[in-house]
Image (cartoon, rainbow, N blue to C red):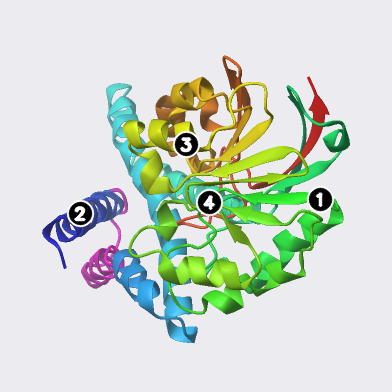
Amino acid sequence: MKAWPLLALVIVQGILFAAHLFFIHTWIAFFPFLAPAAVHALRIAVLSLSFSFLVASLLNFRHSNWFVSAFYTLASVWLGFANYFFLGACLLWPLWYLARAFGAGDDPLVRPLLAGSFVSIGLVTTVYGFINARNIRERRIRVELPGLPQQWRGRRAVLMSDLHLGNINNEDFCRKVVAIAAHHNPDVVFIPGDLFDGSTARLDELIAPLKELKPRFGIFFSSGNHEEFHDPGDYLAAIRKAGIRVLANERVTIDGLHILGINYHEATFPLRVRTTLENLSPGAGEPSILLNHAPVRMPIVEQAGISLQLSGHTHGGQFFPYTFLTRRIFGPFTHGLNRMGNLQVYTSTGAGTWGPPIRIGSAPEIVVLEFERA
C-alpha cells in the first residue's frame, strides 16, 4: 500500500478511537453506580467497536458475502449511533458544570439523569435517521433551457445520483429506485456518479435492476469519486454491460440536446476542466447538459456556454452536524436548483448514503426534470 492511503487510514482511525474514548469516559463518569466489572467490559467493547468501521470498509472493498455484508452494515449502523453519543458527550460536560454553578451538582441523581437523557436522545435521533434515509422523496423541477428544441418541450428526465450500491444499498434498494424512476416514464435518465459505494464485488447483480429501466433516449452516466477510489475499470465495465452509456469526457447529441459528461478526477483540476469543455462544449446558444459529479468549477462551466450542470456528491451533508459543514463548502450549490450567470446547476442530495445509513437534516431524493424553453 502507498504511504498516503496508509497515513489517511491511521489518521481516520485515530480520530474514531479518540471520539470513542471520550464518550465512553463520559458515560463512566456520569454513571458512577456501575460495577467495576461492567465498567471494564463497557470500555473494552466500545473501544473495540471504534475499529469496526475501518475494518469492515477494508473487507467491503474486495468481498461480498453474508458475513461481510452483516459486519459492514452493523459497523455502519454503530458509527451512526457513535456520532450522536459523541455529540451528546460534548454537550454533557458544559451542562454539568452549569448545573454545579447553580448549586444542583450535589444531587447524586443529576449526573445519571443528564447522561441518560443524552443517551436516549442519541438513540432516538439515530433511529429516526435510519427511517428517514429509506424514505426517498420525489422532486419535480421545471427547467428552462435557452434554445431548447421544440420537440424537447415537456419531456422528462430523471436524475438519480449517489445510489452507493453495495452491501447496505443492495439490489433491492436499486430495484426500489428504478421503480420510482419508471413511474415517471422518463425520456432520459442521468446518473452523475457514485452509482457504486466502493466495493468491487457483485457489481453485475447490484446494477441488474437498472436493465429494466427503458427510457426512450437511454441512461447516461459520469463517474464519481467512489468509482475512482482505484482503477474504475471494473465499475465502468459493469455499467456498460447494463446498457448504460458512460460519458468519460465525452459529448453526445440526442434529438438536438447536447449531453456531456466529465470524469470526477478530471473535474478536480481547473485547467483540465477548461480544456475538456473547450473541446466538447457546443458553445452558447446550443442547449447542453453537463454531468459533473460534484458542484464545482461552475465559473469555467458557465464560460464554456453550458446550459445546465447536474451534480450530486454533497448528500446535502447527509446528517447533522455535517449539514452545516457541507453548506460552508458548497454554499447555495449544496442542494437544489441554483444559477451562476447563464449556467443553471441542480445538485441532488442523492438517493443513497455513505457510511452510517442515516439522514438527519437532509433527505434522499429522485429528481424529475421537466424541460421548457426559456
Of the two numbered discs 4 and 2 on the same chain, state the one appearing first in sequence.
2
Q: Which mark is residue 329?
A: none
Query: Mark 1 and mark 3 in contact (Cβ < 8 Å)?
Result: no
Query: Mark 2 and mark 1 in contact (Cβ < 8 Å)?
Result: no
Which residue is identified by label 2?
A: 8
> Which amino acid type corresponds to the residue marked 3 in the rendered image?
Asn
Mark toward the viewer: 3 or 1: 3
Image quadrant occupied by the C terminus: top right
Which residue is identified by label 4?
A: 222
Which residue is identified by label 3?
A: 279
Please, what secondary structure does the residue beneath circle 1 have? loop
Which residue is identified by label 1?
A: 186
Above or below, 45 against 6 in this view is below
Percent coordinates x, y for residue 190 in the rendering: 65, 49
Above or below, 254 against 61 in this view is above
Mark toward the viewer: 4 or 2: 4
> Which amino acid type corresponds to the residue marked 1 in the rendered image?
Pro
Mark 3 nearby-residue class (10 Å; few <14, some 14–19, many ≥20): few
Q: CA distance from mark 3 to mark 1?
A: 29 Å
Mark 1 nearby-residue class (10 Å; few <14, some 14–19, many ≥20): many
> Which amino acid type corresponds to the residue marked 2 in the rendered image?
Ala
Please, what secondary structure does the residue beneath circle 2 have? helix
Please, what secondary structure does the residue beneath circle 3 have? helix
Of the two numbered discs 4 and 3 on the same chain, state the one appearing first in sequence.
4
Mark toward the viewer: 1 or 2: 1
Question: Which range is magenta?
Answer: 30-51
